Image (cartoon, helix red, strand yellow):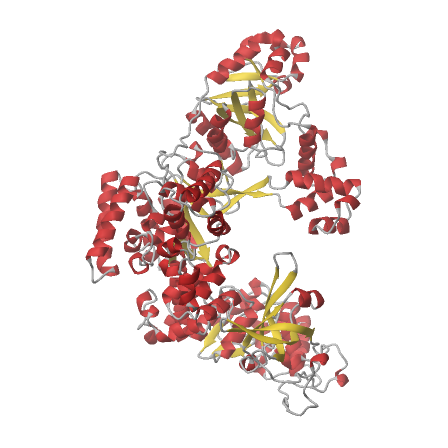
């Protein structure tokens, strides 16, 4: 009897989930129910999936509104009607059109006009599929209305939006947030009606007892509606059924492509390869996944045709078919990749392929996919209300002062000491937290379906300009829609730009290498030495302090070791304590025999009986706990968190424990293994995924090993990586480059290298306008280099403020004129001459101005660079107010092992973390006076006493310790060192220092500092 029900997917209006709506229906003995969210179909599929569990027959519709003004409700008679409604809604959402007062002609959908709207719009004629909705509140007015005579057209429209008073209050807060207004100023017209509640069927029938014909009309309408989506385990994929015209043609094509790929991938051939290929092809055909493979092949083939770099990864990397089709570059035979992780007869969904493109190439490939295939959409996702944001929004709605809002959002309060308003903010934040706030786009998911995508939901049109579904990947997979992941990655852009640079500057040398010759790279001692010594700055996935530390602890010096390290570093493995255990067993083989459970060691001999990869979850669940492969895959999927709340996951967890007990394992071992499984929490990689990352790591390591300066330029030009740009510039200097500030005649928008001369790009000058950069480069390319400041000002239209930035950074240093003099000249020139933005017939005459001799110092230049670039090009140690008392550096750590050291370091990065009991501690990476890197740790007692205060140089006193051969300093004391006063503003008489001063590293006791001085 309820034709107009809302969930919290009626965004910033509804207050509870589709599951709560079904539970409410069950409590009130409602067996048929229509879900009609406002201009939204996000909950539709899950509503249909869950409804049988609550003995409810689901019906789908849409509440069409302009803002909160209800125009009409559309109810689908069947799936075709749902398609019609979704098409209609999507058209309005895409074009941002308002709905008209009357509905279009739907062939398979009913339309319900609210009683008040019919009167207001003076509607007299209704189509056969159109009805008038009467709420309980409308019953008082009905006898006095002309509409009472239209008995066949009247149906019950008792909207359901709230369960309790608390829901209504939450609704009002959501409406205030949506209108960006104080709750006290929220217009009544912006609210729903507090009486929009569900009553039991008995009470509803009682309310309409004088109008039984209305109940009969409503029941007849609902009984004529039926919607169906297949959520069974036997469901068929809803992706594009055939890549070519038929299944037979698809199967023939994939076999041809695999045979074509064999000599490229496996020139030696082999029986094992043929056997694996046949096994995979048979299963892929049986599961109906051939078109899925061919679509991925089509995408990567187009990328290669365009000269785009890509990396195929995910569980699909476990497949030899994917390797032969060149979707991935990971050889599953070499790594003995577990095929059943990738695909098995118990698994309804196809393998997961993540295809990474350069962030510059990805938009082109996305457009290609939308142009190439018919039914395409981006996959949606929901952005939910989070604690901090919610507190801020509700704080504003209640009119709290900013400082009180800040206190609440940080959680620094005691509930018992809050005033009534603050207590309300906390109460409703807890209630609303986790609700959907707005629709967004999945990071890379694209759906390519057989049916029109509006068969499943409406689509909206985010700023990217592509239709996007109103549901997420979890329910998409439930209904048989499997995404293609097309992702953007800066690492690939770095590879591509390096190659472009090398083709320009060193074509003959670079022609000898193939960037895809991974086998050659794996056996290259120069590359493997970089891995072993962790000299990986700028290299994909292996440059962070944590990874550098792990590589040294594991003594990794080969590709297979890097594959393992790429997965061990993930939070799931680290959190379970298995990362440390893996290192211990790796370094001490005897420990494996002593500590590993025989079953676990038999399952995972390559990783010493330690769970490292996602495949290990399936292996352990299947071999250790006796679950079938389908149940084991439920566990693996459950690790993603989104599936963990599903009842099926809970059932499998119980069966895991019961089976282990039946096998005779004691509870201590059972729960130890289960905790390892559970702690992966969606962060562990599939082995093929790790292998894909390791392939890209080796490509970047190759470039760093053989073309380090060009590679560092490409890293800088693509946004750096884990570290700030300053440290990649520092690394380039350490690798032999001479760094130059931006230059009018040598620099481009991005960085450029001439031999070993690296000129920084204009992009670092944050206040320099893009159009000015464009004018400079266009003029220089067209008419040659600039010969003087006057020549530049004659040829480039520029304001005095913009040219001042260039002069201050010394971009006109080729003129051999002091920058202060140039600033005077620029001001006088631009004030005296009217600039005309068109070509000049004659060279203008200039007035010569008498300018006094002016001077600047290198120290002034350093501080100007700090201001304009964000970093200085000299050593930051040269800016210290007090010279370092020693020259101790990273090179000395081994000498001080087990002893205390006094050392200065320039901060690179700080990781703030907490112990298991919530106490803060810090890990910091720094650069010493010689430019080498070292690491420090501040345990909670020290972290409570000393804090890092932003960028700069710190002096440490601490103990040098070694863990698995990795040296670091456990800090005892720390102090931030002061820079000299900025000489551009300070009294220059107070500083006589100049850059390039000679440091005296005396060994006398007077110059040595004591721990107490630090």
Q: Position of residue 567 (x, y in %)?
A: 44, 59
Residue 847 appears in the picture as rendered: no
Task: Please determine whether, in this image, residue 541 is positioned above or below residue 902.
Answer: above
Task: Choose between 630 and 328: the one closer to the eye.
Answer: 630
- Image position of 5 with respect to 865: above or below: above
Please state, as top left, top right, bottom left or bottom right, where the C terminus lies in the image: bottom right
The quadrant holding residue 345 is top left
On the picture, is 695 further left or further right than 147? left
Return the x and y of residue 450 as percentages of the image width and height: 36, 36
Residue 174 in picture, x, y percent from top left: 66, 37
Q: Is residue 6 visible?
A: yes
At a point 79% along the width and 40% down the height, the residue shown is 420
Q: Nearer the viewer, residue 528 or 943?
A: 943
Q: Which residue is found at the position 58% from the left and 25% from the top?
A: 24
Compared across the picture, whether 330 is left or right of 712 comes to left
Give the x, y percent position of residue 52.
47, 26
Nearest the eye: 665 or 65: 665
Dividing the picture into quadrants, the one containing residue 527 is: bottom left
């Amino acid at each position: 009897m309820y034709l107009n029900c809302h969930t919290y997917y009626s965004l910033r209006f509804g207050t509870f989930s589709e599951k709560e709506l079904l539970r409410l229906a069950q409590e009130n003995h409602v067996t048929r129910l229509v879900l009609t969210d406002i201009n939204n179909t996000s909950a539709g599929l899950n509503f249909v999936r869950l409804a049988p569990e609550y003995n409810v027959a689901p019906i789908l519709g849409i509440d069409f509104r302009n803002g909160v003004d209800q125009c009409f409700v559309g109810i689908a008679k069947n799936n075709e009607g749902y398609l019609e409604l979704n098409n209609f809604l999507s058209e309005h959402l895409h074009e941002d059109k308002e709905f008209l007062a009357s509905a279009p002609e739907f062939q398979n959908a009913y339309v319900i006009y609210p009683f008040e709207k019919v009167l207001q719009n003076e509607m007299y004629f209704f189509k056969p599929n159109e009805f008038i909705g009467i709420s309980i509140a409308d019953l008082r007015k009905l006898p006095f209305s002309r509409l009472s005579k239209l008995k066949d057209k009247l149906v019950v429209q008792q909207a359901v939006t709230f369960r309790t008073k608390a829901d209504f209050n939450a609704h009002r807060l959501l409406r205030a947030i949506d209108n960006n207004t104080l709750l006290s100023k929220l217009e009544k017209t912006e609210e729903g009606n507090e009486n929009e509640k569900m009553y039991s069927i008995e009470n509803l029938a009682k309310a309409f007892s004088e109008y039984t014909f209305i109940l009969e009309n409503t029941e007849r309408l609902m009984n004529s509606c039926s919607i169906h989506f297949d959520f069974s385990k036997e469901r068929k994929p809803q992706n594009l059924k055939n890549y070519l015209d038929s299944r037979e043609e698809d199967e023939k094509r994939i076999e041809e492509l695999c045979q074509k790929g064999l000599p490229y991938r496996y020139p030696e051939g082999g029986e094992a390869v043929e056997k694996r290929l046949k096994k995979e092809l048979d299963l892929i055909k049986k599961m109906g996944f051939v078109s899925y493979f061919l679509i991925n092949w089509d995408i990567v083939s187009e990328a290669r045709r365009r000269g785009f770099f890509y990396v195929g990864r995910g569980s699909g990397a476990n497949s030899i078919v994917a390797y032969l089709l060149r979707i991935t570059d990971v050889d599953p035979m070499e790594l003995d990749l577990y095929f059943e992780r990738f695909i098995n007869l118990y698994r309804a969904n196809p393998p997961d392929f993540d295809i990474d493109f350069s962030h510059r190439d990805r938009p082109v490939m996305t457009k290609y996919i939308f142009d190439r295939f018919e039914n395409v959409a981006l996959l949606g996702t929901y952005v939910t209300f989070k604690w901090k944001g919610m507190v801020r929004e509700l704080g504003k709605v209640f009119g709290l002062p900013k400082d009180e809002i800040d206190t609440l959002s940080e959680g620094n309060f005691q509930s018992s000491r809050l005033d009534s308003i603050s207590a309300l903010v906390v109460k409703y934040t807890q209630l609303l937290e986790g609700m959907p706030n707005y629709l967004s786009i999945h990071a890379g998911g694209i759906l390519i379906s057989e049916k029109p995508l509006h068969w499943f939901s409406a689509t909206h049109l985010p700023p990217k300009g592509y239709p996007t579904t109103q549901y997420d990947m979890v329910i998409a997979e439930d209904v048989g829609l499997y995404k293609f992941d097309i992702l953007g990655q800066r690492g690939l852009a770095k590879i591509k730009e390096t190659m472009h640079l090398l083709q320009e500057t060193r074509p003959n040398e670079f022609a000898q290498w193939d960037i895809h010759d991974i086998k050659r790279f794996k056996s290259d001692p120069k590359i493997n030495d970089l891995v072993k010594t962790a000299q990986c700055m700028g290299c994909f996935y292996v440059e962070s302090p944590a990874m550098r530390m792990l590589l040294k602890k594991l003594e990794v010096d080969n590709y297979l070791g890097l594959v393992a390290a790429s997965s061990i570093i993930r939070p799931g493995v680290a959190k379970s304590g298995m990362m440390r255990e893996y290192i211990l067993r790796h370094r001490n083989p005897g420990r494996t025999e002593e500590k590993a459970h025989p079953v676990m060691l038999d399952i995972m001999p390559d990783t010493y009986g330690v769970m490292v990869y996602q495949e290990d979850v399936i292996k352990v669940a299947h071999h250790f706990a006796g679950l079938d492969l389908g149940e084991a895959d439920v566990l693996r999927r459950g690790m993603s968190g989104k599936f963990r709340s599903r009842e099926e996951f809970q059932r499998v967890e119980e069966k895991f424990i019961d089976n282990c007990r039946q096998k005779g394992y004691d509870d201590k071992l059972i729960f130890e293994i289960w905790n390892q499984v559970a702690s992966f929490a969606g962060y562990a990689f599939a082995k093929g995924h790790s292998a894909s990352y390791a392939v890209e790591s080796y490509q970047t390591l190759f470039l760093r090993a053989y073309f380090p300066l060009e590679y560092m330029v490409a890293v800088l030009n693509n946004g750096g990586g884990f570290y700030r740009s300053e440290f990649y510039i520092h690394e380039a200097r350490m690798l032999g480059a001479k760094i130059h500030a931006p230059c009018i005649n040598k620099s481009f928008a991005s960085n450029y290298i001439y031999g070993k001369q690296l000129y920084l790009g204009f992009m670092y000058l944050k206040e320099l306008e893009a159009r000015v950069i464009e004018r400079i480069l266009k003029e220089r390319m067209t008419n040659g280099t600039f010969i003087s400041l006057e020549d530049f000002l004659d040829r480039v239209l520029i304001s005095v403020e913009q040219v001042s930035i260039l002069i201050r950074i010394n971009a006109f240093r080729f003129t051999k004129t002091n920058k202060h003099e140039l600033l005077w000249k620029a001001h006088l020139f631009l004030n005296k001459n009217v600039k005309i933005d068109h070509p000049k017939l004659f060279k203008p005459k200039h007035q010569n101005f008498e300018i006094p001799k002016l001077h600047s110092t290198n120290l002034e230049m350093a501080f100007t660079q700090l201001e304009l670039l964000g970093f200085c090009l000299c050593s930051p140690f040269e800016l210290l107010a007090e010279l370092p008392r020693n020259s101790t550096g990273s090179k000395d750590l081994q000498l001080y092992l087990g002893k205390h050291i006094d050392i200065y370091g320039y901060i690179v990065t700080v990781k703030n973390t907490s112990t298991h009991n919530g106490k803060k501690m810090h890990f910091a990476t720094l650069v010493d006076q010689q430019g080498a890197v070292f690491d420090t740790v501040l345990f909670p007692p020290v972290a409570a006493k000393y804090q890092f205060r932003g960028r700069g140089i710190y002096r440490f006193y601490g103990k040098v310790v070694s863990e698995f051969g990795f040296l670091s300093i456990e800090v005892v004391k720390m102090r931030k060192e002061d820079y000299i006063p900025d000489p551009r503003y300070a009294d220059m008489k107070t500083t006589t220092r100049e850059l390039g001063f000679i440091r005296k590293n005396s060994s006398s006791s007077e110059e040595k500092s004591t721990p107490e001085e630090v």
